Amino acid sequence: MLPILNAVASLAGTWLQGKQEKAKLKQTLEVAKVAAQVKRVEQDGNWDEKAVASMDSSWKDEAWTIFFIMIIGASFIKPLQPIMKDGFLFLNTAPDFIKYGILASIAASFGLKSIAKIRK
């Protein structure tokens, strides 16, 4: 009977050791996931800081702002409304890469990382 008990005890010990190793590996994986997430947040923060710093000497956001003010203003001037309408109809027929290029330019100017979430 003693050899059977030794075999069962050995098997139970091996099973317990396997469970412990699995728990350690799970913990290591969780730590690695958290570390990767922290690194990603730090990198995004650095990107934001660089974007803000580069906007200090940039004229693009001012140019886009002036352009949008002109579009809004022209929309309220009766003689310019047909021209505005024709322009937007024409832009509507432009290839997608032109439309997305315009969106990307505006996003880069104003530092909008969420522009990729805009869908048709």
Image: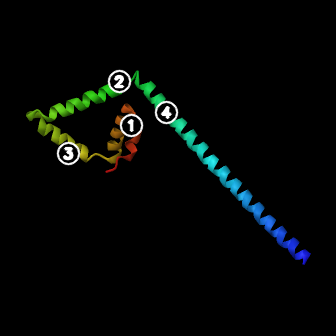
Pointer 3: what residue? 89
- Cα separation, mark 4 vs mark 3, equals 36 Å
Query: In the rendered image of this protein, does residue 100 appear above or below residue 61?
Result: below
Would you name the residue on which mark 1 appears?
A: 112
Q: Which mark is residue 59?
A: 2
The nearer-to-camera label among 2 and 3 is 2
Residue 50 location (% of width, % of height):
48, 28
Mark 1 or mark 2, which has the lower sequence index? 2
Q: Amino acid type of disc 2?
A: Trp
Q: Residue at x 39, y 45 (%)?
A: 116
Residue drawn at x 54%, y 35% is 42
| Real-space Cα separation, disc 4 to disc 1, in angstroms | 12 Å
- Picture coordinates of residue 9 (x, y %)? 83, 69
- Whether the residues at callouts 1 and 3 have beta carbons within 8 Å, the answer is no
Amino acid residing under circle 4: Trp
For marks 2 and 3, the one nearer the N-term is 2
Of residues 47 and 91, the one drawn nearer to the viewer in this rendering: 47
Q: Nearer the viewer, residue 39 or 106?
A: 39
Q: Secondary structure at mark 1?
A: loop
Residue sitting farthest toward the right: 2
Amino acid under label 3?
Answer: Leu
Query: For the residues marked 1 and 3, what is the alpha-carbon distance in whole angstroms?
Result: 26 Å
Work out whether mark 2 precedes mark 4 in sequence or the reverse, and give the earlier one.
4
Separation of residues labelled 2 and 3 (CA atoms):
28 Å
Label 4 belongs to which residue?
Answer: 47
Q: How far apart are the alpha carbons under marks 2 and 4?
A: 19 Å
The mark lying in front, picked from 1 and 3, is 1
Quarter occupied by residue 59: top left
